[in-house]
Amino acid sequence: MIDPKINRRSLLARGALIGGFALTPQLALAAAGTDQRLVFIILRGAMDGLAAIPPIGDARLSQLRGGLAQPPEQFGAMLKLTSDFAAHPALKGFAGLFAAGEASVAHAIASPYRERSHFDAQNIFETGGNAAYALKDGWLNRLLPLLPAAPPPVAIAATLPALLRGAAPTTNFAPSRLPDASASLKARVAALYENDALLHRLWSEAMATEMMAGTNDGGTGNPQDLATSAARLLADPAGPRIAVLDLGGWDTHAGQALRLGNQLRQLDGVITTLKTGLGPAWANTLVIAATEFGRTVAANGTGGTDHGTASAALLAGGRLKAGPAAGRVLGDWPGLSRLFDDRDLMPTTSLNSLFAGAAAGLFGLDPDLVTRSVFAAAPAPPLALIRA
């Protein structure tokens, strides 16, 4: 029985499960004010940057990691990026982009957080603050007023990440395993809202978003499906210009070798799917994949690693090409002879500096303005990533 207190306005405002997606009504479709695209991938759970992008020939890594210093045989051999660094073999597509000047790495990178709680670290990572829960909105939301008018950013996630929460309009949706609603049902709902100016507009926008994202076939929710939907939205001339993907599963306390290899293979598929799906728009795109903190240098007793400090961020996109970051491992590499707290990769580069430099370069903004307006903690100048 339908609760009589839930009227059709409140139902739509909460998001209707139509076409296999929970569509929020905030996504307005309009001409975009910029051709530049940003895809931010949250690697939730603390990705092991030393395993993803290991230094070449560092005996200390092998000494502390033992069998974890090399990937399982089924993934193949490490992929050389530079004379000093390699990529995990599961990152084959990313390594190809790196060789083509369409990818880079920021290593030994961390937020201002120096403790070991996922929840606190993720909050600082997403809000850009100095301390956990000191800020209520996300740094990407605070960036939006500095950008040209465009459709609201979209998070391809079941809930809106803290990164996008705040005063500026944003939206989110996520695939469901529910079957797609029939065309006749959608037509009847459209007819029901025909004489209601507000709901007719919201319904029309929701259906247009569904069509743009290609989600009317009932998605499965796997990361490559999410990347396909994000690419379709971003490639559309009337679509959003910023998308956030939220990928979990990076907390590898046990059995890391196989688990992390599969996670990295999945991430590699997401990045290559974005490139394929964006088509010509890839030339104007920057992808950032980053995590809340890294993992210990030494392996633990269960074939995994524990919560650490510095990690690596992966960058990709056509906007990197011919820029100062193209095909480079960025940052001041600290080596492994001296560890943070005698256990972690020493942080030498600020995540906030990376994010500020990425946003400024991509959207043609004053780096100092971005730092002042968006980040509470930016101890170093923004990193120059993109040539104007």
Image (cartoon, helix red, strand yellow):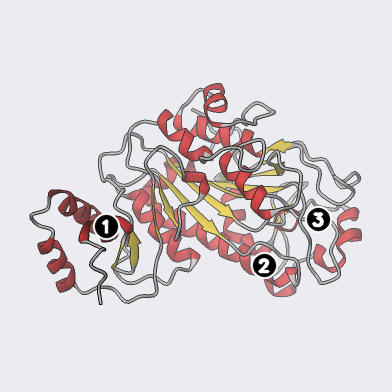
Q: Secondary structure at mark 3?
A: loop
Residue under circle 2?
261
- Answer whether labels 2 and 1 touch (C-beta < 8 Å): no
Whether residue 142 sits left or right of residue 110 in the image: it is left
Quarter the N terminus occupies: bottom left
Residue drawn at the location 63% of the way across and 33% of the way down: 353
Residue drawn at the location 63% of the way across and 62% of the way down: 264
In the image as oriented, which residue stretches furthest toward the left? 195
What's the residue type where badge 1 is placed? Ser
What's the residue type where badge 2 is placed? Gly
**Quadrant of the rendered image containing residue 218:** bottom left
**Quadrant of the rendered image containing residue 130:** top right
Front label number (3 vs 1):
1
Residue drawn at the location 74% of the way across and 46% of the way down: 310
Residue drawn at the location 68% of the way across and 28% of the way down: 380
Q: Earlier in the sequence, mark 3 or mark 1?
A: 1
Residue under circle 3?
296
Whether residue 388 is situated above or below residue 251 in the rendered picture:
above
Q: Earlier in the sequence, mark 2 or mark 1?
A: 1
Q: Compute the Cα span from label 3 to label 2.
A: 17 Å
Whether residue 332 sits left or right of residue 372 in the image: it is right
Q: Compute the Cα span from label 3 to label 1.
A: 48 Å
Q: Compute the Cα span from label 2 to label 1.
A: 44 Å
Residue under circle 1?
10
